[in-house]
Image (cartoon, helix red, strand yellow):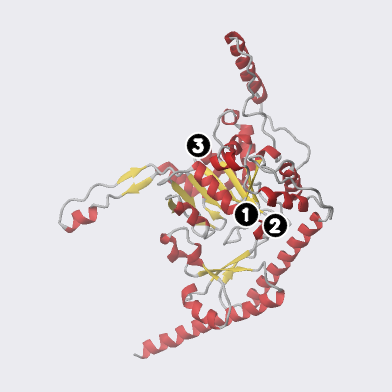
């Protein structure tokens, strides 16, 4: 590996000089985006932009000024550009920044019922109200969100219970607008469910975001870790680029819906603390560059971002990424095949990327009832309740557990599933004994 001298001076807000371009090149290769910068234009878009600039020039000329202005919404590109990227200190930092910039206390954030269990703590730190909508086999049910946006929520006055207790007439129910500020999702090979949101649902979610003016925080850390033979749906920023190209009036405005967060944690090393934010264009990225501590100290990734970029520019990188995905695919197959062979009544879908398998336990077995038996056999899992977006979801998830295949050998995975199966069977056996005893009583 060749070594270059690293710049240890203060760095630009978006990241070290040259590193953003290197990151963009790496991601284009991984996402298999065309290197050619094909501009997505719709009829009248370019003409409208040029006409706006001409009108501004004429007005400045009449006013006797010589200031040159550039439209913030130049022709939208269909491929990732360096100006769409911003280095962070990982996904958590990206979510924290996005929440700080785009929301305020008491705003509503919509999460999937089963979500990345540490993300919700960030929203709680910002005193946001965490709510959910119905889920489907792909995660967040976008149509259910649409209905709730259109119809609103039913408000029941909390004083009603007191009024009813004293025989008074309760206040009438009324409809209130449902207007979230954020929607947080893990749309590709999700954590914990391992499912992927389809293209049409992504397009509809972006459309709804522009209509109702909420922001989407898309945690896309697993998009790059896919071994599916089928092409993945577009990343959310790419969906928004296409939306803006088809809707020039939106492109000429200052609202952008999507902030995508990702990280090198899953492909290099967590301790590096290097991630990135992707936006549809520079309009949204500019909001991150204007944070006070960024203006004061420069980008937070600094030295680590330079180290990472030295690594990803090496010719061995492509082979490493292919080996990594191949290794994860192999471990996932070992886990799923063993789960099928044990066949103790659990249900799961085999993922084609990411880190996790989401298991529904047999009827009558919960993650809590399983825990003492699993601990005795020295096998671990993440309980479904830990992944709940809020307390209201916990009961719905009590029969689910999350297994991670990324860091174990094939033999360890097989041993772990055997022990887990034994633990489940012990719970079921105990329940049978208890049922018989109660029946005799």
Residue picked out by circle 2 = 226
SS assignment at label 1? loop
Q: Residue furthest bottom?
A: 440
Judging depth in this view, the residue of 131 and 140 nearest the camera is 131
Q: Position of residue 234 (x, y in %)?
A: 66, 46
Q: Is residue 114 left or right of residue 236?
A: left
The residue lying at 23 percent from left, 56 percent from top is 161
Q: Are marks 2 and 3 in contact (CB under 8 Å)?
A: no
Which residue of the protein is positioned furthest toward the front in this rendering? 9
Left or right: 320 in relation to 403 = right
- Residues tagged 2 and 1 counted as in contact (Cβ below 8 A): yes
Residues at marks 1 and 3, CA–CA distance in whole angstroms: 24 Å
**Label of residue 153 in the image:** none
Q: Residue 211, labelled with which disc?
A: 3
Indicate which disc, 2 or 3, sits on the residue closer to the N terminus.
Answer: 3
**Who is closer to the viewer here, 24 or 274?**
274
The image position of residue 215, as x and y in percent, is: 52, 42
Task: Measure the alpha-carbon separation of dots 2 and 1.
Answer: 9 Å
Disc 1: which residue: 188
């Amino acid at each position: 590996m060749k070594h270059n001298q690293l710049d240890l001076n203060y760095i630009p807000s978006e990241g070290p000089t040259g590193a953003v371009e290197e990151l963009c090149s790496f991601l284009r290769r991984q996402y298999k985006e065309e290197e050619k910068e094909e501009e997505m234009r719709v009829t009248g878009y370019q003409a409208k932009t040029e006409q706006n600039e001409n009108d501004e020039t004429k007005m400045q000329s009449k006013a006797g000024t010589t200031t040159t202005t550039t439209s913030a919404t130049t022709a939208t590109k269909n491929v990732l550009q360096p100006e769409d990227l911003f280095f962070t200190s990982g996904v958590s930092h990206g979510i924290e920044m996005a929440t700080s910039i785009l929301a305020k206390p008491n705003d509503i954030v919509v999460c999937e019922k089963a979500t990345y269990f540490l993300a919700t703590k960030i929203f709680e730190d910002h005193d946001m109200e965490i709510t959910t909508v119905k889920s489907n086999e792909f995660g967040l049910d976008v149509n259910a969100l649409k209905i709730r946006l259109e119809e609103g929520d039913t408000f029941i006055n909390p004083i009603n219970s007191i009024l009813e207790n004293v025989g008074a007439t309760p206040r009438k129910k009324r409809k209130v607008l449902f207007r979230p500020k954020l929607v947080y999702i893990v749309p590709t090979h999700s954590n914990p469910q391992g499912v992927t949101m389809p293209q049409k649902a992504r397009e509809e979610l972006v459309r709804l975001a522009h209509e109702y003016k909420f922001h989407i925080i898309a945690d896309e850390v697993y998009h790059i870790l896919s071994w599916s033979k089928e092409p993945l749906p577009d990343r959310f920023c790419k969906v928004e680029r296409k939306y803006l190209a088809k809707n020039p009036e939106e492109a000429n405005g200052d609202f952008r819906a999507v902030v995508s967060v990702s990280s090198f944690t899953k492909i290099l090393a967590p301790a590096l603390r290097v991630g990135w934010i992707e936006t549809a264009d520079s309009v949204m990225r500019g909001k991150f560059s204007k944070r006070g501590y960024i203006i004061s100290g420069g980008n937070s990734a600094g030295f680590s971002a330079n180290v990472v970029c030295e690594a990803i520019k090496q010719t061995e990188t492509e082979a490493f990424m292919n080996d990594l995905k191949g290794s994860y695919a192999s471990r996932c197959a070992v886990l799923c095949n063993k789960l099928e062979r044990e066949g103790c009544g659990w249900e799961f879908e085999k993922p084609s990327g990411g880190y996790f398998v989401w298991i529904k336990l047999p009827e009558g077995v919960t993650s809590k009832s399983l825990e003492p038996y699993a601990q005795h056999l020295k096998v671990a899992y993440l309980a479904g309740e830990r992944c709940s977006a809020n307390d209201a979801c916990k009961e719905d998830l009590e029969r689910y557990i999350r297994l991670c295949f990324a860091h174990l050998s094939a033999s360890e995975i097989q041993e772990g599933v055997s022990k887990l199966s034994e633990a489940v069977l012990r719970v079921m056996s105990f329940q049978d004994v208890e049922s018989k005893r109660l029946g005799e009583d």
